[in-house]
Image (cartoon, rainbow, N blue to C red):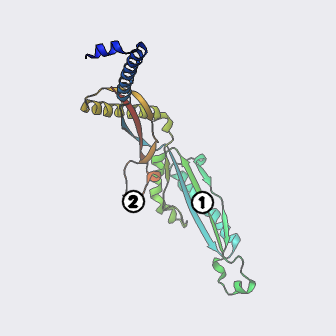
Amino acid sequence: MKISEKLKNLPTIWVAIMAFGVALGGFFIGNGVYQSVASRTVTVKGLAEMDVVADTAVWNIKFNRVGGDLTRVQSDIDNDIVKTRKFLTDNGFEDNELQNLRITVRDKFAGYSDAQRMDQEKTDRYVIETGVMVRSKSVNLVDSVSRKMGDLVRQGVTVTEDYAGPIYVFNGLNDIKIKMIELATKNATAAGEQFAKDAGATLGKIKTANQGTFSISARDQVDAWSDNERQAINKRVRVVSTITFFLK
């Protein structure tokens, strides 16, 4: 017996139910295909890099004096400050770019009893430490003068903490952020388009986007195991954007 003849023999209500079931099944199948296609995505990363130059230098020149007569040691420190500031101004720095650092005094025999002090050599009891800080936007001048510290040492100034050299800072990150994000997005889009092409699809709209974190490193790495960004005038700014696109 044909199916049409069987349906004629069924009650009307059962025919209606079967027809609705077929239609409902068709809806879910169609909707499932649509959701599957719509949820097809690709996640890509876009890199943007830009070379920049530091715009501010901070340089701490520290020195100390040691002796048994505190007044004499302080007088020697005062002379070192005068010599250091003159050395800096003679080499092109302005007075408003210089600042004296705090003075610290250390008594090497602090806490000793009188008897213990009598057994110690008194000529080096006191240690006074201080220095001069240079803060300047003339980063090339700072770099040049920092290489002449031998001239200051030859004047009798005991430089104790100049081995790290000046610190160079780049303050213009906000001025280049938008441009770099645009470049990173452009590179991510190009990668997504290539992926879609290889997959036989078309790149759709953006589903999600994460601009990533900006990082600053030395443009020219001195070695492979340390980060010398703070000592580098020439720096490299980097950001990676992660973008998820729909595929059509």
Q: Amino acid at mark 2?
A: Trp
Q: Which of the two discs, 1 and 2, labels the residue nearer the N terminus?
A: 1
User: In the current view of this chain or complex, which residue is farthest to the right?
Assistant: 114
Q: Quadrant of residue 13?
A: top left
Q: Is residue 218 above or below residue 81?
A: above
Q: Residues within 10 Å of mark 1 (few under 14, many from 20)?
A: many
Name the residue tied to disc 1. Answer: 131
Alpha carbon distance from label 1 to label 2: 31 Å
Nearer-the-camera pick, 242 or 144: 242
Q: Amino acid at mark 1?
A: Gly
Residue in the picture at 29% in, 31% down: 196
Query: Percent position (x, y) of residue 94?
Result: 56, 47
Q: Is residue 124 above or below residue 210?
A: below
**The label number, if any, that marks residue 44 in the structure image:** none
How many numbered marks, from 0 up? 2
Name the residue tied to disc 2. Answer: 225
Q: Residues within 10 Å of mark 2 (few under 14, many from 20)?
A: few
Q: Secondary structure at mark 1?
A: strand
Q: Secondary structure at mark 2?
A: loop
Quarter placement of the N terminus: top left
Q: Is residue 96 above or below residue 26?
A: below
Query: Percent position (x, y) of residue 191?
Result: 31, 34
